[in-house]
Image: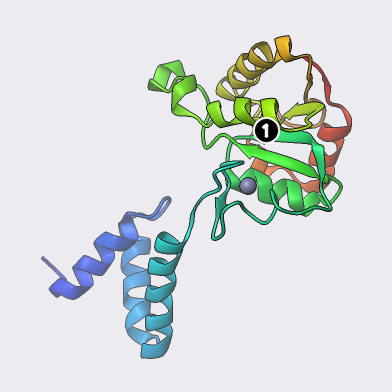
Amino acid sequence: MYYPEPISKLIDSFMKLPGIGPKTAARLAFFVLTMKEEDVLTFSKSLIDAKRNLSYCTVCGNITDVDPCHICTDKQRDASIICVVQDTKDVIAMEKMRDYNGLYHVLQGAISPMDGIGPEDINVASLLVRLQSETVQELILATNSTIEGEATAMYISRLVKPSGIRTTRIAHGLPVGGDLEYADEVTLSKAMEGRREL
Ligand SMILES: [Zn+2]
């Protein structure tokens, strides 16, 4: 009980964020006291708006403020290719690369038996629906090159194989055990070029 209650509550809130320990949380909380009131209002409103106005696209599973999302409804995109990724940050990484013009499917996770996460816990069912109703010719499995990411890619590849749709896996350039979102654009671009049949 070193701090007045409003400050200790604020510190507790900051500590709920990933990578923020007690020291950083205290530093941020005290910084808030020095901020202009209007900036604090804007900040708190952004937090609430982000939480209330964002949902998952019912087609691809990406985070969006309109449903279906801007990527799914973009007629300029090549609807014959779907790139399967683990989360929204991977879509952003791919979009920064700028040479992919197909669609996405965001799993919002990966299969991980160790953590009790099975195929039914990730966004796979809606992918199968898309493959039935759309003119998809290739599925690029761009899950992370971790054990979970590889297992997820294998699972989807086996599931899709009977449909005759080409499934490829991004390969070269990505560090083993690495997350897609941390790859630089050149590495990611190479990984896309080096994708192989599964
Ligand atoms: Zn979408």
Is 74 located above or below residue 120 in the figure?
below
Report if residue 179 is visible in the image: yes
State the image quarter where residue 182 is shown.
top right
Amino acid at circle 1: Val
Locate residue 42, reporting x and y percent. 43, 80
Q: Secondary structure at mark 1?
A: strand
At a point 63% along the width and 36% down the height, the residue shown is: 179
What residue sits right under mark 1 in the picture? 84
Of the 4 image quadrants, the one containing the C terminus is top right
The number of callouts visible is 1
At a point 52% along the width and 32% down the height, the residue shown is: 123
State the image quarter where residue 165 is shown.
top right
At a point 40% along the width and 89% down the height, the residue shown is: 38
Q: Few, some or many C-alpha atoms within 10 Å of disc 1 (few <14, some 14-19, many ≥20)?
A: many
Locate residue 31, reporting x and y percent. 37, 78
State the image quarter where residue 146 is shown.
top right
As drawn, the residue found furthest toward the front would be: 133
Locate residue 144, reporting x and y percent. 64, 30
As drawn, the residue found furthest toward the left would be: 1
Between 163 and 44, the one nearer to me in the picture: 163
Is 186 located above or below residue 12 in the figure?
above
Locate residue 6, reporting x and y percent. 18, 74
At a point 67% along the width and 56% down the height, the residue shown is: 70
Of the 4 image quadrants, the one containing the N terminus is bottom left
Q: What kind of colouring is applied to the model shown?
A: rainbow
Between 50 and 114, the one nearer to me in the picture: 50
Asked if residue 52 lies left or right of residue 168, the reply is: left
Between 52 and 32, the one nearer to me in the picture: 52
Report if residue 170 is visible in the image: no
Is 156 located above or below residue 122 in the figure?
above
Asked if residue 112 lies left or right of residue 22, the reply is: right
Is 118 located above or below residue 45 in the figure?
above
